Image: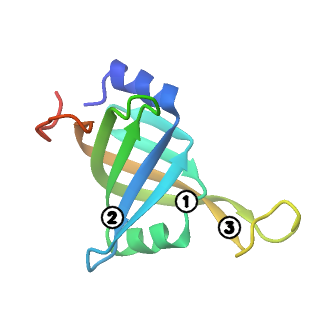
Amino acid sequence: MINEEIRHFVDRVGHAFVATADAEGNPHLAAGRGITIMEPDRLVFESWFCQTSLKNLDENASVAVAIADPVTGNGFQFLGRVEKTVDTAVLNGYAPELEPAGLPQVQWRLEIRVEKVMAFTADAHSDRPLG
């Protein structure tokens, strides 16, 4: 599903937008870095996701991930489900001069099982899965 061309693109861009929605369908958009492709159908993030994203994932595991070239705006959209969340780091006020307000901040590892990969573009497109 995720071929070598897509893998190289993801590695080169290095950041993405992650859309979640709560149980009522209210959307939330977050940005993430630290993207890795672990298998041909699995994306893994390790990033500082906000509490709204995590609350939404507790209610609704479906996500859309868009990774786009910052110059052209074109890229790929991945639709799938978060199968696992793990907290990997916490900022808890130990170094207040370095940490943002609203603590604690938590870094999360999200493992996403990709069900569809589509082109992401502002040009004419079909929303048909690639491959």
When asked about the image quadrant of residue 2, the answer is: top left
Q: Nearer the viewer, mark 3 or mark 1?
A: 3
Local crowd size for mark 2, using a 10 Å CA cut-off: few (<14), some (14–19), many (≥20) = some
Local crowd size for mark 3, using a 10 Å CA cut-off: few (<14), some (14–19), many (≥20) = some
- Element type where label 1 sits in the image: strand
Query: Could you tell me residue 78's position as x and y percent?
Result: 30, 43
Q: Are the residues flagged by discs 3 and 1 in contact, CB closer than 8 Å?
A: no
Residue at mark 2 to residue at mark 1: CA–CA distance = 14 Å
Q: Nearer the viewer, mark 2 or mark 1?
A: 2
What kind of residue is marked 2? Ala
- Element type where label 3 sits in the image: strand
Residue at 35 percent of width and 19 percent of height:
5
- Element type where label 2 sits in the image: loop
The residue positioned farthest toward the bottom in the image shown: 24
Labels 2 and 1: the sequence-earlier one:
2
Q: Which residue is mark 1?
A: 86
Residue at 43 percent of width and 34 percent of height:
37
Apparent side of residue 86 relative to residue 18 in the rendered image (left or right) = right
Q: Which residue is mark 2?
A: 61
Q: Which residue is mark 3?
A: 105
What kind of residue is marked 1? Val
Query: Could you tell me residue 116's position as x and y percent?
Result: 21, 42
